């Protein structure tokens, strides 16, 4: 297990140094650790925003298609129709530009960045066996490096060490309050982001799938525990990134970018075929019409 962790760490080393360099650069501009982390978050989210936009559009498309998906599921019930159902669903997704797993994309993309930022923050307070503070991943000539050495590895912002976690030793409960506030703000923002999506759906008359609603209720709770066991600096990153996603979604909703549906009710392939058959049913046509219909079919 240790060898696997070491191998993964070796792969990410250049990225650790890149993030460390960016942190030190921003700190050099404005000597405040929180500001440096916020500016780094803005850069990261700037790179991820195109994926967030695409994911949001895909998620909205999936929600719009729920009634039609249910029609297909009713039409092709049973295990014997499973393959046909899957084919029709895939065709529906392609036509409407929807992706069943598109809504998970932002979370999946965030995971490596969380790992990288966590590793970089942990490296800033690196202490050798001799007890000497030697920050890792940032240039040794940077202002951040010298200030970290002088502070003993503490990432202090307004008396709050961002390297600590909720359950770290703070000396008193009062000193731990800011860390709890960080976690509470992060969870509230996640709920707000989900409520933003749900309210938009209600206004457009779209029903959120039950499974997605259940996931939305429990995901922030799971993340709340996650926020308690990571450094406050990483929680700050999550707070800022969520705010940026909320702003991005709001701008998309206002501009109508998140509405990829082509308009009008889509006719299911099976229903369309039945309609054609019903229209040209032989029993309702006179002999002359039947012969015309046969000639049209042969021409096709």
Image (cartoon, rainbow, N blue to C red):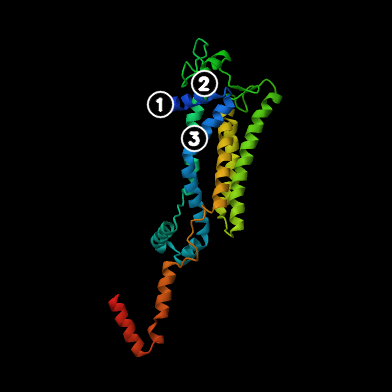
Crowdedness near tag 1: few (<14), some (14–19) or many (≥20) residues, C-alpha within 10 Å: few
**Could you say whether the residue bearing mark 3 is in a helix, strand or loop?**
helix
Farthest right residue in view: 174
- Could you tell me residue 300's position as x and y percent? 30, 75
Position above or below: 14 against 278: above
Position above or below: 227 against 72: above
In this rendering, position of residue 178 left or right of residue 273: right
Farthest front residue in view: 29
Q: Which residue is mark 3?
A: 44
CB atoms at circles 2 and 3 under 8 Å apart?
no
Position above or below: 279 against 15: below
Q: Earlier in the sequence, mark 1 or mark 2?
A: 1
Nearer mark to the viewer, of 2 and 3: 3
Farthest top residue in view: 130
- Could you tell me residue 51's position as x and y percent? 46, 44
- Could you tell me residue 81's position as x and y percent? 41, 63
Q: Which residue is mark 1?
A: 14
**Could you say whether the residue bearing mark 2 is in a helix, strand or loop?**
helix
In this rendering, position of residue 196 left or right of residue 10: right
Q: Quadrant of residue 84?
A: bottom left
Q: Earlier in the sequence, mark 2 or mark 3?
A: 3
Determine which of the numbered discs, if any, sits on residue 107 in the image: none
CB atoms at circles 1 and 3 under 8 Å apart?
no
Closer to the camera, 74 or 67? 67
Point 49% across, 15% down: residue: 134
Point 42% across, 25% down: residue: 2
Q: Earlier in the sequence, mark 1 or mark 3?
A: 1
Nearer mark to the viewer, of 1 and 3: 3
Position above or below: 177 against 242: above
Q: CA distance from mark 1 to mark 3?
A: 16 Å
Determine which of the numbered discs, if any, sits on residue 124 in the image: 2
């Amino acid at each position: 297990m240790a060898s696997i962790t070491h191998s993964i760490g070796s792969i990410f080393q250049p990225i650790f140094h890149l993030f460390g360099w960016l942190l030190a650069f921003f700190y050099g501009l404005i000597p405040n650790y929180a500001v440096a982390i916020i500016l780094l978050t803005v850069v990261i989210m700037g790179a991820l925003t195109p994926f967030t936009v695409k994911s949001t559009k895909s998620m909205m498309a999936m929600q719009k298609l729920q009634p039609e998906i249910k029609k297909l599921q009713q039409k092709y019930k049973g295990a014997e129709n499973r393959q046909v159902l899957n084919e029709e669903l895939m065709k529906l997704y392609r036509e409407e530009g929807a992706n069943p797993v598109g809504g998970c994309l932002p979370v999946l993309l965030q995971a490596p960045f969380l790992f990288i930022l966590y590793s970089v923050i942990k490296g800033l307070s690196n202490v050798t066996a001799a007890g000497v503070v030697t920050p890792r991943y940032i240039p040794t000539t940077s202002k951040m490096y010298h200030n970290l050495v002088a502070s003993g590895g503490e990432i202090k912002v307004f008396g709050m060490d961002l390297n600590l976690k909720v359950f770290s030793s703070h000396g008193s409960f009062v000193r731990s309050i800011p860390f709890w506030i960080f976690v509470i703000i992060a969870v509230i923002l996640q709920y707000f982001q989900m409520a933003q999506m749900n309210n938009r759906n209600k206004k457009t008359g779209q029903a959120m799938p039950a499974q997605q609603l259940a996931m939305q209720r429990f995901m922030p709770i799971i993340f709340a525990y996650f926020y308690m066991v990571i450094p406050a600096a990483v929680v700050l990153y999550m707070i800022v990134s969520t705010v940026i996603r909320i702003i991005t979604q709001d701008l998309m909703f206002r501009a109508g970018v998140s509405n990829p549906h082509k308009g009008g009710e889509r006719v299911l392939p099976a229903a369309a075929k039945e309609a054609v058959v019903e229209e040209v049913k032989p029993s309702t046509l006179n002999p002359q019409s039947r012969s015309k219909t046969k000639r049209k079919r042969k021409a096709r």
